[in-house]
Image (cartoon, grey):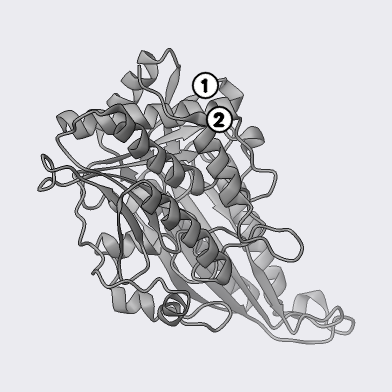
Amino acid sequence: MTSIDAKRLLGRIRELGAIGRDSEGRLVRLAASDGDKLGRDRFVGWLREAGLDVVIDRLGNIFGIWRSEDNAGQAPILIGSHIDTVIDAGIYDGCYGVLAGLEVIETVQASGLALSRPLAVAAFTNEEGVRYSPDMMGSLVLAGGLSVDEALASLGTDGSILGQELARIGYAGAEEPGFLKPHAYLELHIEQGPVLEREGVPIGAVENLQGISWQRVTIDGIANHAGTTPMSMRSDAGYAAARVVTFLHDRAKASNTPTVATVGTMRLEPNAINVIPSRAVFTVDLRNPDEQHLRAEEAALAACLEELAEIEGVTVSVERLARFEPVIFDRRIVELIEAAAKNRGLVSKRMTSGAGHDAQMMARIGPAAMIFVPSAGGISHNPREHTGDAELVAGANILLDVATQLAWNGL
């Protein structure tokens, strides 16, 4: 049974993980930053060393494509993820899937196996969405969910323009996003959650992905003296915001569905210890794998805000930041993942992805699915993010088996 080169894969993961460190030693490869350029340069170098055709589209998505004379006219099997990171990141999120995709191609090259379809690997731009919004931007544009011009005009948190930054670092390509239309898409990823480790299962066959609703809520009250204003006469934006936080937490915790709700950012104005807040601005992240349930949670939040406005004498406004419907991955590919795990003597588990991934965008344009491997302690977006070497290799071998099966027989 053919297997990937474990030493090469693990070495590249660690080498890429050392690139883009700041003065404090943190891994910070934000999209189109100087650190991102260094990571991109190394990845492209590996693609060229492998003899792949390297293509970069206008949004900076990087593709390494391996074709033969026999399959050059066929749509490829695309393996992808991202190499941009959050601030103070771990070394596996996204990067593992991209480097495993390259490893799969090199392993097939070395095996001499003739495939009916080309293989390709992609590193998508701005998956994390830390510097530019929305997240999963590169794959979203490729799938037709956002125009390339609108994406390139995105204003960064630091005041930069994405298109200008891509040009500055040398990754504003010439091809239109979508020039490559895959026959199927695969993404290998660390789970970023605790389920596989807790249950002692090495492989997750991801069958669906949660819908995501992001909103920014602004509550306006009246600033007043914290000592002289009776509690019954306050229009306290901070208190109203706190009511929303507890409402969302308690509702999600009591739900008989896998709803999760998070208030991840909050800002109070004037932000003084002795002044009643006149304004609270916060974000709400709602997720559920069922579209009807997600809509119910959005409706419940809207009703809560309407009631608060009346009871607390505040004004509420809501801005939609992002909205992605739940995704059901291709059943046939999920079954191939399970079969590949069984063939290698590994237990697998069907799963829902709680995080957003490029695969949810790629599923809009063709068959797609994901493979998960365990995350120690369920930790991700953190330098303590860790997956054992044997688990990383096992996941890459499953990716190899599924990708070659798809490239040989299709769907």
User: Dot 2, crowdedness within 10 Å: few (<14), some or many (≥20)?
Assistant: some
Residue 48 place in picture, x, y as percent: 37, 53
Q: Secondary structure at mark 1?
A: loop
Residue 91 place in picture, x, y as percent: 60, 47
Rendered view: 241 above or below 219: above
In this view, the residue in front, 265 or 69, is 69
According to the picture, the residue beneath numbered tag 2 turns out to be 195
In this view, the residue in front, 167 or 200, is 167
Precedes in sequence: disc 1 or disc 2 = 2
Query: Can residue 286 be seen here?
Result: yes
- Residue beneath the point at 64% across and 43% down: 385
Residue type at mark 1? Val
Residue type at mark 2? Val
Query: Can residue 332 be seen here?
Result: no
**Cα distance, mark 1 to mark 2?**
8 Å
Rendered view: 55 above or below 236: above
In this view, the residue in front, 48 or 146, is 48
Task: Tell me if 299 is positioned left or right of 146 in this view.
Answer: right
